[in-house]
Image (spheres, rainbow, N blue to C red):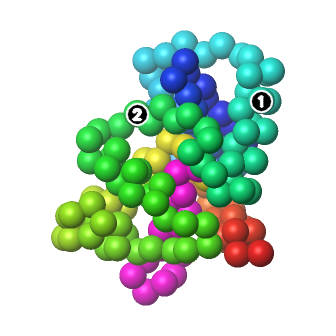
Amino acid sequence: MVLGLSDKGLCWLGFMVKGYKGDGLERMRAHLRDVSFIRDDLAVQAMGDAVVQAWESGSVEAVPLDLRGTDFQQRVWQALLKIGRGRRLSYGDVANDIGRAHAARAVGSAVGENPVSLLVPCHRVVRADGSLGNYGWGLALKERILARETE
C-alpha cells in the first residue's frame, strides 16, 4: 500500500503493483505534483492501520480525506463513498446518482482518476453488463478486493 498524507488527511492510497498507469509511487508523484515528499514511517504506519480498520469495518468516514480533483471528479468520488460494502454499481448508475444521466464515460474517467483507492471504492463500479471493467491497479486486485468484501 502506498499512502500520501497531508495536514488535512489522506490524499493518496495506491498499491505497489504495476498498473497500466504505473506503480503506486509513480502515480502518487504524478497526481501530487505540487507537493514535497517527506518520509514519515510512523505517520504512514498509523494511517495504514486506520485505513485497513476503516475498510474492514465499513466506517470509512473515520479516516479524514483530502481529495484533490475537479468539481466533477469530487462529485463522482462523493457518490462512490455512498456505495456500500459488497454492492456494485455501473458507471451509468453513478452518473444518475450525480444528476448527469448521460455522462457515464465522463464518470468512468473520474473513477479512473480516484486518488484514494479502496476507501473511495472505485473497485465497486462495474460495466452495465456486470463485467468488472477496468481497474488502475489491475483486474486481479479488483477481483480480490471485491471477493474479500463479500466474505
Task: Determine if residue 128 is in view.
Answer: yes
Query: Residue, x 74% and y 17% (percent of image)?
Result: 40
Secondary element at tag 1 = helix
Of helix, strand and loop, which mostly describes the magenta segment?
A: loop
Q: Point out residue 65 in the picture as x, y percentages from the top left corner.
A: 52, 35
Secondary element at tag 2 = loop
Judge left or right: residue 25 versus residue 8: right
Task: Determine if residue 23 is in view.
Answer: no
Question: Vertically, is 63 above or below 127?
Answer: above
Question: Vertically, is 61 above or below 46?
Answer: below
Report, in whole angstroms, how far the alpha carbon at label 2 lies from the one at label 1. 22 Å
Which residue appears farthest toward the bottom when viewing the image? 129
**To which residue does mark 1 refer?**
46
Q: Point out residue 36 in the picture as x, y percentages from the top left corner.
A: 54, 13
Where does the magenta region start and end?
Answer: 119-134
Judge left or right: residue 26 versus residue 79: right
Do the numbered discs 2 and 1 sit on residues whose CB atoms are within 8 Å? no
- Choose between 42 and 15: the one closer to the eye: 42
Q: Point out residue 133 in the picture as x, y percentages from the top left corner.
A: 49, 72
**To which residue does mark 2 refer?**
68
Judge left or right: residue 89 versus residue 108: right
* Number of other residues with Cα within 10 Å of mark 2, as a class: few under 14, some 14 to 19, many 20 or more: some
Query: Residue, x 30% and y 66% (percent of image)?
Result: 97
Quarter of the image with the C terminus is bottom right
The disc labelled 2 sits on which kind of residue? Answer: Arg
| Magenta span includes 130 | yes
